[in-house]
Amino acid sequence: MARFLYSVMFYCLLPVIALRLLWRGLKSPNYLRRWSERLGFCHKSNLDIPTIWLHAVSVGETLAAVPLVRALQEKYTDHKLFITCMTPTGSDRVLSIFGDSVEHSYAPYDLPDAVARFLSRVKPKLLIIMETELWPNTIAACKQRGIPVIVANARLSEKSAQGYKRISSMVRPMLRSLHTVAAQHTDDVERFHGLGLPVSASVVTGNIKFDLHLDEGFRAKAVQLNEDWRGSANRPILLAASTHKGEDELILAAFTKIKMQVKSLLLVLVPRHPERFKSVAELCQKTGFTTVRRSHNVSTAGADILLGDSMGELMTFYGASDLAFVGGSLVPTGGHNVIEPASWGVPVLTGPHLFNFSEAAELLTEGGGMLVCQDSDELATQCTLLLQDVNALQAMSASARQVAEANRGALDRLLKVIGRVI
């Protein structure tokens, strides 16, 4: 009954959802395209080849899935991968990273007819959901058709668990329909158990985001970018990555204070969402600092701020920086991937809102590779101290890299879970 009421409510909200897509499309035109895929009208797959369906919500989950997708392609050459996501930026990442080596569309809305339409066209043998994107009708439809569902790299914050508890009549049967939850941490598993997941359907595999592979080509690009940004003056570089609305002002306020002590510092500011590039550029210009945009492909020699308004370069930016602030953490968004800069051996700074990456943040903080700053003033103070103390910066860099390397291995454990199903 709970899922029926949920479905009725979802159908009633479709006009609102369409209006929201139209509204977002005013800033990001890609939201106006490919609506039919959201209703399950994806292209039909070659049904003679068994299909693994992998769902990644947006950019973060797509990037986390890269090593998993590569491993699946290498290990299961007789299968094809069908990757879905929910956002245009996630779709862009899928297409740019994997090209035509995978099939791709937007995921169907969690409506019975849309999901049924999608499943009849793709006919997957297995669904792998990245992290925690649980849709009751999708999971129920997969169970009805005998399609195992694995939640990979699963995480569940205390806040999300409390929200799920309020709709336990729908969540409990949904969790009991899952084949396996491969969780990042024991805390995540315990929260899933508290919501009704059977103990036999859970395993702790660790966080596959630690299994990031930085090949020589990638490293060479970062080295070249570092040289370009530093210039003849050997400028220090502070990266503020994946910032959100309301956070850019705090970063710029901190940067103003840091510049008083470290006058040659270059700030590389990368907003999380492309539709904000223009407004953040205007915000930077209002500060009086000389600002250039990455998309304009101009020199940073005379600039104070470089706006990272390109797509797909953030990982390279991390490798080219001396310090990295990871956004979504000075505002209550929950933070973004702190493992990526650590994998480069780049010291990490964040704000206090880290519930999306709580376990990784705890490992890095305890290991000495990350500092949590409560506000803009503390961020300015910590950045200034590190930039003025080469030994402290190098020690924190080594600690960040050590924590990242020590926690590898989750991908192999996850592949064993998948191997028991395929």
Image (cartoon, rainbow, N blue to C red):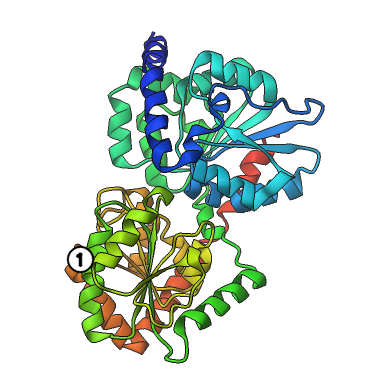
Rendering quarter of residue 8: top left
Quarter in which the N terminus is drawn: top left
Front one among 410 and 213 = 213
Check the image and report above or below for 376 versus 162: below
Task: Judge whether 32 appears above or below 342 on screen.
Answer: above
Quarter of the image with the C terminus in it: top right
The residue to which callout 1 is attached is 376
In the image, residue 284 lies at what x, y percent?
29, 65
Which is more toward the observer, 80 or 149? 80
Tell me the quarter of the picture where residue 188 sits: top left
**Where residue 268 appears, x then y in whole percent?**
39, 70
| Amino acid bearing label 1 | Ser
- Indicate left or right for 171 with 127 as reference: left
Please name the residue shown 68% across and 51% down the image: 70
Q: Is residue 394 left or right of residue 319?
A: left
Q: Residues within 10 Å of mark 1 (few under 14, many from 20)?
A: some
Q: Secondary structure at mark 1?
A: helix
Task: Residue 47: give x, y in percent of width and height.
Answer: 78, 25
Q: Visible in this render: residue 343?
A: no
For the residue pair 380 and 205, the one nearer the viewer reads as: 380
Q: Residue 144: horizontal and vertical position, in percent?
A: 59, 15
Please name the residue shown 47% across and 66% down the image: 294
Residue nearest the viewer, comparing 35 with 153: 35
Location of residue 226 with respect to 172 vertically, above or below: below
* Residue displayed at 32% across by 54% down: 279
The residue that appears at 56% across and 29% down in the rendered structure is 179
